[in-house]
Amino acid sequence: MSSISSAAEQIITDQGAEWTVSARKDFYSRDQGSRIMPLRWISALKQPDGQPFMAESLDRYGYLPNKTRKPAGLPVGFTVASGSEGQEIGMNCSACHTRQIEVNGTAYLIDGGPGIVDFQSFLADLDAAVKAILTDKQAFTDFARAVLGPSATSKDKEKLQKAVKAWYLPYHTLIERALPAKPWGPARLDAVSMIFNRLAGLDIGSPPTYMIPENIQPAVAPVRYPFLWNASIQDKTQWPGFASNGNDILALSRNLGEVYGVFGVFHPKKDKWRLLGVDYLANNSAEFQGLEALEDLVKKISPPKWPWKIDQALADKGKEIFARKTEQGGCADCHGIKPGQTRFRDRKTWATPLMDVGTDSKEYEILARTVKTGVLEGAKIPFLASPLKPVDTAFNVLGTSVLGSILQHYVPVLMKTEEEVGAKSTQPPFPPETESLREAFIARPVEAKPSYPYESRVLEGIWAAAPYLHNGSVPTLAELLKPAAERISSFKIGPAYDIVNIGLAAEQNKFDYTLETTDCSDRNSGNSRCGHEFGTKLSAEEKKALLEYLKTL
């Protein structure tokens, strides 16, 4: 489909004095340890029509051009770092957490906003592009010439082909097994499934492939990308709220899990000489300093200011409605700013209530998935994580992998022997600042009557975060104020924005994609628009006033 993105005038939305040009530039290119493939390879790959795979900075998937990045042509959030094959391309958080919306031919850049990107198509097309050079002799000849130069020997070409095949085997296995038949579409992805699939399916098997293919399952619980502003202030994070938040080491645990799911290299191995019995850093591409720097940058991103005119008198009426009790159509009980749990000295947090409000339940099915634990069978972290069983939850495998990596990185000589730990079993063998990691991955207890709570975030900048609900099943805030039975059942997704109803415009021309949602009779579809029936009984004038106030947050 065509797009006005490349031609549209761009306005950089006001996101506070701390969010400077240099901070933005760093955010767009800082390495976090993701390694997709050698840069020379992806630069040499082709689309089916013969155009470079990286043409127009991957605009066809919704990624945005990084005009200050060298080498030229990389999108926002695509990184370059040294790897085993020279320079390697990767991704950081800004690739999926930077958005551009379009109103009347003008583009508005919003840093930290939910990306309107089609990650599934990017993954699938990359798989197809590599398959093409492995199955078409002329395509490989052209690829090898671009990568190695015109004077490459037959031995050089054979070595390259062997390396590409070794890269393709795990990647294709992941793509073939994980990508769902019903696409996530732009602005959504099943992040939890893909992290579980990559970690349990590609990382913890035996060498040389490290694969356990049967651990990979279809990623069928898509969610929308969350906004990043105020992320560090929440006292809970992740859509189901399974991670405590509020200090730097908890932030690292959150972000390290993301690296392992987005092209991070991670192959732990048994090592009886280590206190934890596993070497989590032997083959680990995570860039800890980069992750810390990115978290510091995210702290500087303020919610975007509404760039259009506001009817202040109407917004004032909306403020009063917002502050009402929930049963009177208000929002503040769940979404107002209240003190949260303090987890590090004087660093304050905002309370992030976990509420089951009747929304889609599919993500909880994913969180309960079990996998073979491979080389991590029996792995334990004293006082933080129980030993992994031969078959355990993917959630526990992720928690053990992240916590083990953090502890071994920050406590390289873990100070105490196994015997000392046994003799003083009431004292953790780790420094006090790691104590909060106990709450980094909180598994939900089995309930007699299942519930499906998700986080209720403070709504600053909510106007810029459509589509709505955790699974992106409602296109506008105006639509969200309708009873679920009256909400639109399908809508197009793209960057064109409706500043009256606040959210995605009805007409889009960027992507040829329409999201089909289900009603409350199928709450576990992954695409249900059910739930969150608050404010639905407000009058039309009250709803209009409330929407005007939400623009000001």
Image (cartoon, rainbow, N blue to C red):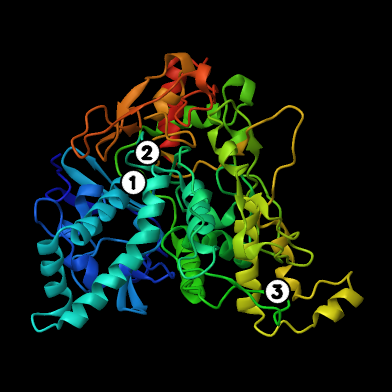
**Residue lying at 61% horizontally and 65% vertically, measured from the top left:** 375
Q: Is residue 76 left or right of residue 427?
A: left
Helix, strand or loop at mark 1: helix
Q: Give the foreground label among 1 and 3.
A: 3
**Residue lying at 89% horizontally and 69% vertically, measured from the top left:** 426
**Circle nearer the N terminus (3, 2):** 2
Q: Are marks 1 and 3 in contact (CB under 8 Å)?
A: no
Which quarter of the figure is the N terminus placed in?
A: top left
Q: Are marks 3 and 2 in contact (CB under 8 Å)?
A: no
Q: Amino acid at mark 3?
A: Gly
Let me know if residue 281 appears in the view.
Answer: yes
Instruction: Tell me the crowding category of disc 2: few under 14, some 14 to 19, or many 20 or more residues within 10 angstroms, Cα based.
Output: many
**Circle nearer the N terminus (1, 3):** 1
x and y percent of residue 310 in the render?
35, 36
In the depicted view, which residue is nearer to us: 544 or 156?
A: 156
Q: Are marks 2 and 1 in contact (CB under 8 Å)?
A: yes
The residues bearing labels 1 and 3 have C-alpha atoms spaced at a distance of: 36 Å
Which mark, by number, is residue 54? Answer: none
The residues bearing labels 2 and 1 have C-alpha atoms spaced at a distance of: 7 Å
Which mark, by number, is residue 184? Answer: 2
x and y percent of residue 256 in the render?
53, 64
Q: Quadrant of residue 248?
A: bottom right
Please name the residue that numbered disc 1 is placed on: 120
Q: Amino acid at mark 2?
A: Trp
Q: Give the foreground label among 3 and 2.
A: 3
Please name the residue that numbered disc 3 is placed on: 277
x and y percent of residue 328 in the render?
61, 20
**Circle nearer the N terminus (2, 1):** 1
Helix, strand or loop at mark 3: loop
In the depicted view, which residue is nearer to us: 502 or 261?
A: 261
